[in-house]
Amino acid sequence: RAVVSLSSSSLPMPVSTFYANHVLTARPDGTTLDIRKSRWKKFGPFLAGQAALGIVTVKDNQTLTSIDKGHISLKDARKQRRKEVEAAGGADGDSTKTKTAIVSLCIIPQRISSSLALPDDLVLAENAKAPERRGTGFLTKPEVRDCLEHYISREGLDDGSGAADIRLDATLCDILYGRSKKERAAAGDNRGDFPTRASRKDAHELFVKKTDSAYALVEMPGSKILKLERGVPPKIIVEVTTLRGRRNKTVSFVRNLEDYGINPVSFANDVSKRFATSATIDEDPKHNGREALKKKNYVEVGFQGHLGEELRVLLTGGAEGRSGHGGAKGGSYKVPKNVIDLRLKKGVPAKRKC
């Protein structure tokens, strides 16, 4: 299983790396591997036997230089590999894997839509291309600009010419340039001078800034919307720190997995097998001197070792970060890029990317 899933581009590779990062992680779930109980006793003699059969080529018993995936001895392993790939719903490669992305959206506040008397079909995105957005009020920036253009056209603020500049009536001027009492007090005045004309581009940008932030979690390819939420996308925090009094011992903590539909207990079990490390589930990190969780029923997962980069690669499906550890590959997680917040606490060195 390790040989048929190994990319030829990753060769040559130290034998020790092949064993730790690929052989151990290729063992079936729920099993252990103790080569000392086999007739070879050590991995070196076993690999030499495979080299004698022509499955692999090893240099000086230390470096794996080539593999023969088409070898007759690997027939069953190739079949199993194909079944695993088909069960995952894709081909053996990254090109057909599904991924997720964050798309920024906007919501026009009720006070603005009422002041401008905007029609509901525009404000609620009734004609949105994505059926999941229809009637929700979650708008793309072009759709927000269409709402503004509807008001400009209806009120004749561009004289029907589609010019680069538009006139500003009192209502639109107040929405685009109006300030709160706090902002006026900070500026040292109560009124302020408002313009009577503005460029169309500036008006569009100002109007978008007056909307509320929102986002969509989208599965690609296919542009299927998995979730619509107000606000900004939450971060999955991966923090690597040292144990108190033991600066040579590191622990990696992960929180907010629940925001992206990842079961923390299942994730802890998966990572433990992939990286041969121990895991903990903490429902109250504050009790142990760490920052409190921001949401109820959320937990923090901890792993022994410096796994920051490996966890980022695993969670994003390789879309972000780099790691040569075989356990970081082949996961089913689809966290979008720019969502992982990797934090290295004081005294923790940046891990060399390979």
Image (tube, rainbow, N blue to C red):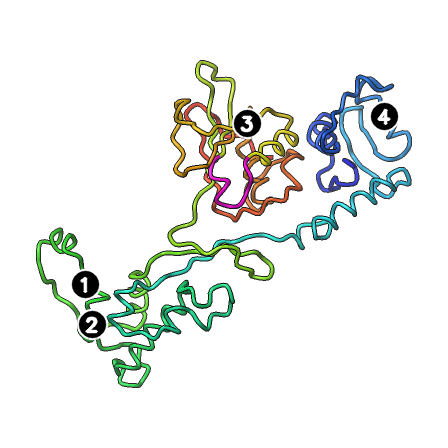
Q: Which residue is the site of mark 4?
A: 48
Q: Which residue is the site of mark 2?
A: 171
Is 34 displayed left or right of 141 in the figure?
Answer: right
Q: Is residue 263 magenta?
A: yes
Q: Earlier in the sequence, mark 3 or mark 1?
A: 1
Task: Give whichever of 342, 301 is nearer the camera.
Answer: 301
Three-letter code for the amino acid on which mark 1 is drawn: Gly
Three-letter code for the amino acid on which mark 4 is drawn: Ala
- Marks 2 and 3 sit apart, C-alpha to C-alpha, by 57 Å
Is 309 displayed left or right of 185 in the figure?
Answer: right
- Marks 2 and 1 sit apart, C-alpha to C-alpha, by 10 Å
- Report the residue at 79% width, 21% height from top: 35
Span shown in magenta: 255-264
Q: Position of residue 246 (x, y in %)?
A: 48, 15
Q: Earlier in the sequence, mark 2 or mark 1?
A: 2
Three-letter code for the amino acid on which mark 2 is drawn: Thr
- Report the residue at 36% width, 56% height from top: 213
Q: Which residue is the site of mark 3?
A: 303
Q: Earlier in the sequence, mark 2 or mark 3?
A: 2
Residue 224, quarter of picture: bottom right
Label 2 close to label 3 by CB (< 8 Å): no
Q: Position of residue 250 (x, y in %)?
A: 51, 22
Q: Which residue is the site of mark 1?
A: 178
Label 4 close to label 3 by CB (< 8 Å): no
Secondary structure beneath disc 3? strand
- Name the residue at the front extreme: 297
Q: Earlier in the sequence, mark 4 or mark 3?
A: 4
